[in-house]
């Protein structure tokens, strides 16, 4: 646990010691706020469903941009060789990096509560739906982070890691959507329906936290963190 904490602190500080965190937070809040309020006053309803509906697509581009450097930069600079010689397990490094990126995401989501306060001031939105929406937002964001982290372990080129991260997240996002399921073979329907990141997120947005949705996201996170660990370990074998 001590090693994970040390990696977490190092990575989290590195976000704020460089422009990365400030650019990510500023652009995320700016774009999401503009897109939200662009239609908020037209709808004339005090609710945030449109905000939560935008997040899978905004996260699709922003989160891989954060994770693309986590391992790719280490490989390019050669610091990964030093890191791997330290008395620390590969899984601890992976978890520490993941938690640091998750903390950055949590700070960003926390700052977006300004939108919630604005909507609450203007109307009376359903509190349960808002809480469920933010929980779903963090779970989906954490899944994106785990996928992006894995993409970063596969290459030292940050652009390649970025594109691979977006592509994988996009496939998992739409695979459970109606237009995909409609054209899928019958035997694949239940598999695609369960694997869809977007389908489970939409389920949470209804305001009900189903254990199946939570287990799904935790499984996706654990699976890609495991793949990341294997990818890091394979570097030693080579």
Image: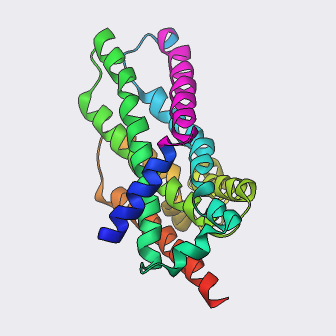
Quarter assignment of residue 93: bottom left
Q: Quadrant of the N terminus?
A: bottom left
> Is residue 90 shown to the viewer in this render?
yes
In this orientation, which residue lies closer to the viewer: 186 or 65?
65
Residues rendered magenta in the picture: 16-41
Q: Is residue 170 left or right of residue 217?
A: right
Magenta span: chief secondary structure: helix
Residue at 61% x, 50% y: name it: 64
Q: Position of residue 114 (x, y in %)?
A: 37, 22
Q: Is residue 11 magenta?
A: no
The image shows residue 37 at horizontal and vertical percentages of 50, 16
Question: Is residue 37 found inside the magenta-colored segment of the image?
Answer: yes
Name the side, left or right, on which 238 lies relative to 21.
Answer: right
Residue 107: horizontal and vertical position, in percent? 39, 39
State the image quarter where residue 148 is shown.
bottom right
Q: Quadrant of the C terminus?
A: bottom right
Q: Nearer the viewer, residue 79 or 203?
A: 79
């Amino acid at each position: 646990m001590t090693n994970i904490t040390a990696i977490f602190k190092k990575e989290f500080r590195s976000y704020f010691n460089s422009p990365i965190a400030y650019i990510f937070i500023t652009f995320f809040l700016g774009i999401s706020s503009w897109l939200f309020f662009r239609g908020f006053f037209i709808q004339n309803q005090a609710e945030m469903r449109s905000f939560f509906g935008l997040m899978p697509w905004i996260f699709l581009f922003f989160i891989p941009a954060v994770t693309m450097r986590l391992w790719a930069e280490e490989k390019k600079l050669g610091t990964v060789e030093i890191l791997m010689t330290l008395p620390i397990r590969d899984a601890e490094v992976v978890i520490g990096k993941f938690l640091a990126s998750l903390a950055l995401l949590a700070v960003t989501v926390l700052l977006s509560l300004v939108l919630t306060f604005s909507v609450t001031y203007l109307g009376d939105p359903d509190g349960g739906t808002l809480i469920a929406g933010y929980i779903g937002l963090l779970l989906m964001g954490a899944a994106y982070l785990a996928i992006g982290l894995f993409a970063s372990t596969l290459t030292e080129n940050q652009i390649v890691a970025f594109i691979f991260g977006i592509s994988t997240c996009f496939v998992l996002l739409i695979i459970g959507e109606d237009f995909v399921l409609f054209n899928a073979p019958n035997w694949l329907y239940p598999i695609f329906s369960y694997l869809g990141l977007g389908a489970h997120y939409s389920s949470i947005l209804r305001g009900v936290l189903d254990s199946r949705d939570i287990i799904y996201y935790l499984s996706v996170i654990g699976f890609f963190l495991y793949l990341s660990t294997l990818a890091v370990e394979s570097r030693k074998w080579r």
